[in-house]
Amino acid sequence: MRFFSIFSFIVLLLLVGCQPDDVSQAMREVTTDRLLSHISVLADDSLEGRRPASLGEQKTIDYLVAQYKAIGLEPAGENGTYLQKVPTVGTQIDQNTVFEFKKGGKSISLKFYNDFIALSGYHQAVVSVKDAEVVFVGYGIVAPEQGWNDYKDVDVKGKVLLVLNNDPATDDPNFFAGKGRTYYGRWTYKYEIAAQKGAIGAIVLHTTESAGYPFSVVQSTWSAERYDLAAANGAPKLKLKSWTTEEATRRYVSLAGFDLDRLVADAQEKTFKPVPLGVKISTTMKFNIRHLETNNVVGLLRGSDTELSKENVLFTAHWDHFGIGKPVNGDSIYNGALDNASGVSLMLTLSKAFSTMKLKRSILFAAVTAEEFGLLGSQYLAEHPTVPIKSIVANINTDGMNIWGKTKDITFLGQERSTLGADIAEVANVMKMEVKPDPQPEQGSFYRSDHFNFAKVGIPCLSMRTGTAFVGKPETFAKEIMEQYIALHYHKPSDQIAADWNLEGGRQQAEFIIRLTKRIANNASTPQWNPNDEFAKFR
């Protein structure tokens, strides 16, 4: 009997030792086949590019709801459903629109698409600007904490402003993030501050260097029907919101008798003052207006702890892309396989993996709409949350999965802003990976995806990026593949599944997020912004 008891005890120890931990168990649900299968559905031509408020949307949300149900997520949208309706307005500009610039007896005309892209903050069928004075306002930034004010209290009411993209670049990391980009450098800020100052319009000068992408991206993004939230939030609006190419800008600045390079150079100094160009702009923009509804798809995996389950870790990934648009090489369907069918696939796969774990806090999954049209779905969710906003302790966003293989490093946008950075460091140590800063801070990527809207309401947030040190690849590999993707596939119909994809990189990211989420969901303390971060005041 004693021998049998000892033998049984040894067998029991061996069996316990062979049991997988919860992370290993969860990772059994994360296979490259599962990741690829979701992308294959979401990026298929039958979904017609997943444009909001289209047949493609209906097919997309039907698939997402079916997956949520199969995984066992609770409905966390409106009225006991998985859906949150997002009221929007669609505006399509007349492609024959022209800008006319005049000075004295001279004038030049710019053509829509080739020379400029434009839309309006007014949801009207016809919006006109007549002989509005154009004023160059440098970077168009008012940043008291930096001692910077491009407006110098000059009255710009009723005028159209020419503004530089980005913010002043220096080597000082404490001055507009040095070589990085702050929100002051985003084109969205340029329009917001111009409207606050009473201008009726703002034109952003496009250069590939300052934007981080060629003008073709602006063309494909802005030339088709654009969306805006239907509900006004009380913020002032611009009649005219536009980009002009560098070549076109030189033309109308030269008409005014100025040298563009000289103006740009002057704008680098704090002493810069707005420059009235003495040229006037006129345009009549005709729009086709549609009132639409699109949807966020929201599901909940309830936590196991009686009290902590009342709090939520929010995952976001945008399901939308550009639908059917201008053909490129005969293909007019903008499938968005990497951007962002891959991110949604990762989120769905993670929700299945999390369902095998015992997590104390609840996990909220939101496939959000209209990211490509101004982060509208996440903005609406942040402003109209389906759970109490204070119950959301953190947001992890995925806008593109690693499709190029495993890396030795990892980056999360926002990792340096909150206590989540320490959690990332701990997970990286376990996985023997190096945490690296944003490799392209000049792109201002923190302000360009859905997590940004949750930062604005005080939720510590992260957005996962692909690493740069690929296993078995030369050091230049990451730079080469990203430049190739931006040039050939970003916001183009060619963003499709390719034979050279290696989703082991996606599996690696999934494991990292599983381990990170376990720490966030089970830790008694909640994530906090670092005291001096710009978003700490909102928490």
Image (spheres, rainbow, N blue to C red):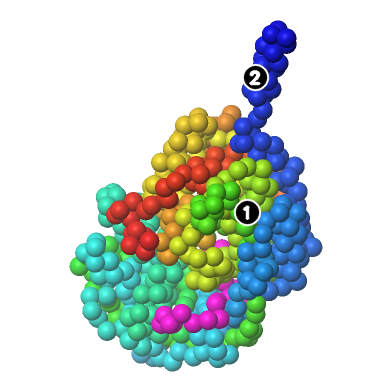
* Residue 244 image point, x, y percent: 47, 72
Mark 1 or mark 2, earlier in chain = 2
Q: Label 2's element?
A: helix
> Mark 1 sits on what residue?
301
Left or right placement of residue 137 versus residue 82 in this view:
left
* Residue 216 is covered by the magenta coloring: yes
* Residue 342 is covered by the magenta coloring: no
Q: Residues within 10 Å of mark 1 (few under 14, many from 20)?
A: many
| Above or below for 262 versus 72 | below
Q: Is residue 108 visible?
A: no
Give the residue type that dot 2 points to: Leu
* Residue 444 image point, x, y percent: 43, 57
Q: Quadrant of residue 325?
A: bottom right
Looking at the figure, which quarter contains the N terminus? Answer: top right
Give 357 or 428, whichever is nearer the viewer.
Answer: 357
> Mark 2 sits on what residue?
13
Q: Which residues are magenta?
A: 215-237
Residue depicted at 41% across the width and 61% down the height: 458
